[in-house]
Image (tube, rainbow, N blue to C red):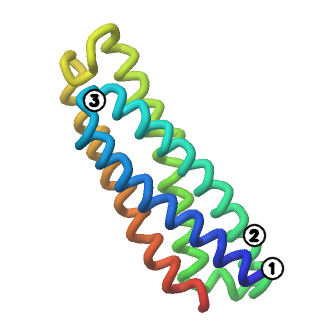
Amino acid sequence: MYRLSLIVITLWVGALWATGFSAYVLFDNLQDKQLAGLLAGKLFTVVSYIGMGSAFYLLVQRPMDYGTAALKQSFFWTVLLMLLLVLAGHFGIQPLLAQLKADAMPADVMNSVFASRFKNWHGVASVAYLAECLLGFVLVLKARS
């Protein structure tokens, strides 16, 4: 079970970081920012599902291995916090951003009356994603404890 947990952690944290860098590359290299946003959004959706599945596995597996002592481990609480960030991003912030884009149609949201609101919520999403990525480092370091 321990080795499977390491694989799950590697998949989740690796996907977080790879997707973050990929989004940067997309926006930096594609002229069409709407296309870059669409592709990045699809990547973030996939990573959200990886995160939800990984967190579910780790939150079930850890207590099975350590019993109630798992609730006293920072590993458990790091996973739970990461899961909460995933859920907030996927079911809270991302739908809000999608609605702002839809409301702006046929114009690009950045050229609409919704631009400042979109920028604010995009900033919140970025900070939450960065926090999740940094917690991923903690998760890797705590995997043995």
Residue in the image at 60% along x and 76% along y: 76
Q: Amino acid at mark 1?
A: Met
Q: Quadrant of residue 52?
A: bottom right
- Label 1 neighbour load within 10 Å: few <14, some 14-19, many 20+: few
Counting from the top left corner in percent of width and height, residue 24 is at 29, 49
Mark 1 — residue? 64
Q: Are marks 2 and 1 in contact (CB under 8 Å)?
A: yes
Q: Nearer the viewer, residue 20 or 60?
A: 20
Q: Amino acid at mark 3?
A: Lys
Mark 3 — residue? 33
Residue in the image at 53% along x and 42% along y: 45
- Quarter of the N terminus within the rendering: bottom right
**Taking 127 as reference, is 131 above or below it?**
below
Residue in the image at 59% along x and 65% along y: 11
**Taking 137 as reference, is 124 above or below it?**
above
Residue in the image at 51% along x and 77% along y: 139
Counting from the top left corner in percent of width and height, residue 131 is at 37, 63
Q: CA distance from mark 3 to mark 2?
A: 40 Å
Which of the marked residues, 3 or 2, is nearer the chain's N terminus? 3
SS class, disc 1: helix
- Label 2 neighbour load within 10 Å: few <14, some 14-19, many 20+: few
Q: Quadrant of residue 116?
A: top left
Q: CA distance from mark 1 to mark 3?
A: 46 Å
Q: Nearer the viewer, residue 68 or 143?
A: 143
**Taking 83 as reference, is 98 above or below it?**
above
Is 107 situated left or right of 82 in this image? Answer: left
Which of the marked residues, 1 or 3, is nearer the chain's N terminus? 3
Is 103 situated left or right of 3 in this image? Answer: left
Mark 2 — residue? 60
Is 44 situated left or right of 24 in this image? Answer: right
Is 106 situated left or right of 138 in this image? Answer: left
Q: Amino acid at mark 2?
A: Val
